[in-house]
Amino acid sequence: MNQADLTKPSLMTGSIRRGNRWRDAVGAYAFILPSFILITVFYLIPILMTGFYSVTKFNLIQKPTFVGLDNYTRMFSDPFVTASIRNTFVFTLVTVPIQTFLALLLAAVFASRKDGFWKNFTKSSTFIPVISSMIIVGVLWRMMFNTDIGIINSLLSVFGVEPVNWLGDKNTALLAVCIVSIWKNVGYFLVIYYVAIMEIPRSLYEAAEMDGANRRQQFWMITIPSLRNITYLVVTLGTIWSFQVFDLVYIMTGGGPGTSTITLVMTIYDTAFKVYDMGYASAISFLLFTIVILVSVIQKRFLGERG
Amino acid sequence: MALMSFQDTATLDFHFRVDKFDLDNYKRIFKNYNFFGYLSNSLYVVASACVLNTFISSMAGYAFAKKHFPLKRELFWLYLATMMIPAQVTLIPTFIIMKQLDLLNTLTALYLPILNAFGVFLCRQFMQEGLPDELIEAARMDGCRELRIYTSVVLPLAKPVLVSLAVFTFITTWNDFIWPLVIITDSAKQTLTLALSTLQTNYTVNYGLVTAGTTLTFLPPFLFYVFMQKQFVEGIAFSGIKA
């Protein structure tokens, strides 16, 4: 009998078996350990710390002092916070539906075209904004939105439209940021939708065609319903991302003009690293966290997985 | 819209470059603005993040996919939960932690927090189906120690997901902005994306310079993407469908 035979189940007595299982477990924990340590240190502990600091007053130099719910009550009368919440919500409500719809539409268009050079080329180009850094995108679009020499206004003037002060006018600044964000994200969601559309069985379409349905009817009756779960993913992911927007706004408008483009994360950043009011900033962070969780739960309720 | 993304970098670059002597801007950006330093910073951080994330996450992913141990389900749920925490919420505490660990203003601080549950999730999904149990059993029968099984059997078979993960990590780390903004105070230690933003706020009119910097920051991920397109797209589709 050699080593291998001893591990055959029939030959393993109770204690050897239990010993093996214990050894397996220890081995498994060892494999998970590095990852677990990092996640604990950088995710689990921080989230607890945020909660802790949110009820203190802390400026990094002196020890934190407990202030109860003061930070939270302060938030509601703080014009920066209310502006950020409003802007962030507007941003989300504008960008998520549009980018979802565009991604779906474009994916459907791509899916119906034959494979070929142009198809691959355009598919790849929609993805380039996705891999570009927000900063690059922001820098470039800021140039394009420039009131005097920007490309956007030049294009508009061809149609006789007066130059728009995109980034300097508080009515249009947020819109400009929305446009850029949509442009950047569509590629990502397009890929997801495209792959999902490809997985819809052809037989469904063939059957519909035989029943006399035209292309548009097929789209509405087959494609859209089959994509329900994917749409849930796209919308949820898009929403969570849009709540976190910072880089783009920082580089395009810095929050201005006035407070018309300031977002929640920007406010957190300013409060924490410009004013060093860590306690208050933690409270705002916790607010952000709560909003994200709430929105996710609501979305799951209404759009969640079925079947 | 799709084509604009390509034209963007090309047109603006062209327009202004021809305006202000081509390569001169690039030379200036390297000499006067220390872009070589920023480039190497970014590369170092990104490379470290990729290597670390690939190994550590695949180890954990392997354990979750193939091994059996108590509390496995609960632990995995914990991992999934952390994926829901927006990075911005942990920004401040992580900063404080780095301060305690004396890692403020270091490049190490830049890549350490990149490792997260997403990599583990991705690896686990792949390994559950992509790694045949029989192969692992066979290796065990042959007397291989666990670590050897991991390096000789698991890693080679997991190449597709490892590549996808490396690509994701590369792109995320390279483009990371708010974290380096918070941690780095020494201008010499800045990453490329960070340096680019300061370049703009200081010299808002010098478009040639800014576009040169932009192109430089854009090139590595772009090249990476061009070569790894297939894996990248597969990775996204995979995570999207299975999520």
Image: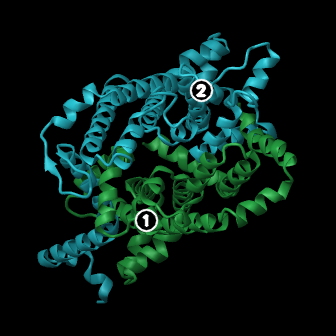
Amino acid on which disc 1 is placed: Asn
User: Along the line of sight, which residue is nearer the eye, A145 or B185?
Assistant: B185
Q: Which residue is at the far bottom?
A: A1
Q: Quadrant of residue A122?
A: top right
Q: In front here: A78 or A187? A: A78
Q: Whole-percent x and y of residue B43? A: 59, 66
In space, the residues marked 1 and 2 are separated at their CA atoms by: 34 Å
Examine the image and state in which quarter residue B109 appears. Answer: bottom left
What's the chain of the residue with tag 2?
A
- Above-or-below relation of B98 to A26: above
Look at the image and tell me in which quarter the N terminus of chain A lies: bottom left
Q: Judge left or right: residue A202 versus residue A292.
A: right
Q: Color of chain B here?
A: green
Q: Residue at x 39, y 44 (%)?
A: A269
Q: Nearer the viewer, mark 1 or mark 2?
A: 2
SS label for mark 1:
loop
Q: Give the numbered dot on residue B105.
A: 1
Q: Circle 1 marks a residue in which chain?
A: B
**What residue appears at the point 45 percent right and 37 percent down from the top-left corner?**
A241
- Mark sitting on residue A168: 2
Query: What element does badge 2 sit on?
Result: loop
Report if residue A210 is visible in the image: no
Tell me: A247 left or right of A8: right
Near mark 2 (Cα within 10 A), the count class, few <14, some 14-19 or many ≥20, is some
- The chain whose colour is cyan is A
